[in-house]
Amino acid sequence: MNSPLPKVLHPVAGRPMIERIIRAVKEAKAEEVRVVVGFGEELIRPIVEPLGAICHKQERQLGTADAIRSASPESMRGEILILNGDHPLLETEDVLAFRKKFKESKAALAVVTCELPEPGPFGRVVRSGGSVRAIVEAKDASHETLKIKEVNTGIYILRADVLQKLLPQVKSHNAQGEYYLTDIVSLAVEQGLTVDGFVADSRVALGVNTQSELANATQLAFQRKAQRLMEAGVMFLDPASAYIEESVSITAGTVIYPNVFIKGRTKIGAMSVVEPGTFISDSEIGENVHVKAGCYFDGAKVSANVDVGPYAHLRPGTEVGEDCKIGNFVEMKKVKFARGAKASHLTYLGDAEIGENTNIGCGTITCNYAADRQKYVTKIGADCFIGSDTQFVAPVTVGDGAIIGSGSTITKDVPAKALAVARGKQVIIENYQPRPKGERGGDS
């Protein structure tokens, strides 16, 4: 991967590969998940252990069979599913299907396979009379064996007692001097055990070993999410250029424009529109919300019937009520913006509470960060009119129905229904003649 990050922690569509796999098997009701770790153990453990997985360290990387030995197979019971940590497109439905087929097959061991037009480095599946007889690693395969298109995905399902019997018999008699897990197939055949092969979609075999393959897997994951949303009634102008993580929920009737990135626990209601260049993370957007081009949402909540943008920035803790308007180049952080309020242009509101139907004029700022490095709150009541270019030096409160004159710097509370003007007096000097340039002292 040419990266300091352990391979399995590289993200695919927003989630580390290993997290995606653990979640798939946990949702398939696996009783226990064991993860074999080696390189990057100190980074992998904090990711997988909170998911309920148990880490087992492989002291020396001597092959896949040795990795399984590191996971204490002697303490396992029931059915064992063995997966690779770098197959990020595996889904819960796949795991459930493997288990169902295994139960129906009555086999002692099953390997999941797929057919590839260009098998490349994949191990080849050798069959005889339809049954799997062996898996041969590409680097150990003959010219004739390399012609086989059916390959091993690296996914196995077998009974614990079979694994415990066969694993100690695996030897390192190969070109790499490693212990191959694939050898348990030929060992099982030699001992008269039934080995089955389940042909699956090639998607489950998609492993990631390069940055190019990582990008391809991410693209496929985003495309799959877009397809599912379209099947549920969400409209896309260009699904190939919409980047929506699997954890996102979007209701039917909403329109997604190109070049949109939506991630995390975001929820978007019905009949909304998200225009190009928008980034939305961990936010909740109600019905009939128009998000115009270039907006950035992070941990915000927007109620129904709201227009936002273009180029608005809603930061964490912001809650926008119904029927509001947030215009171009408006930034909000930790703001409660009540129903019907408006901030149409070029405004910063931070640590503020804005009442219903209040109009915030262009260029208004809440000065929430003081010299003591503390944040203070500005409270503006309902039905207020805030003139353009107003600064509120928090903490300060403005009562309902108040009017603030343009260009004011408000440092004291303003009563309800009052007019507040706080600005320098305009001075006009008629027939003013500036001094000649040479008489201006230090002026230049």
Image: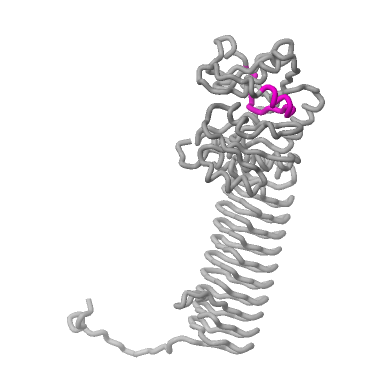
Q: Position of residue 284 (x, y in %)?
A: 67, 59
Q: Position of residue 334 (x, y in %)?
A: 59, 69
**Is residue 127 visible from the viewing direction of this image?**
yes
Total labels: the figure holds: 0
Q: Position of residue 302 (x, y in %)?
A: 66, 63
User: For the C terminus, which image quadrant?
Assistant: bottom left
| Residue interval drawn in magenta | 149-166
Magenta span contains residue 153: yes
Magenta span contains residue 205: no
- Nearest to the observer: residue 50 or residue 328: 50
Residue pictured at 70% horizontal, 45% vertical = 229
Vertical order, 5 against 81 (above or below)? below
Tell me the quarter of the picture where residue 424 sits: bottom left
Vertical order, 205 against 123 (above or below)? below
Residue pictured at 61% horizontal, 51% vertical = 262
- In the displayed structure, does residue 250 sit left or right of residue 428? right
Vertical order, 174 against 333 (above or below)? above
Q: Position of residue 425 (x, y in %)?
A: 43, 89
- In the displayed structure, does residue 342 sit left or right of residue 405? right
**Is residue 242 visible from the viewing direction of this image?**
no
Tell me the quarter of the picture where residue 107 sits: top right
- Nearest to the observer: residue 314 or residue 322: 314
- Nearest to the observer: residue 73 or residue 318: 73
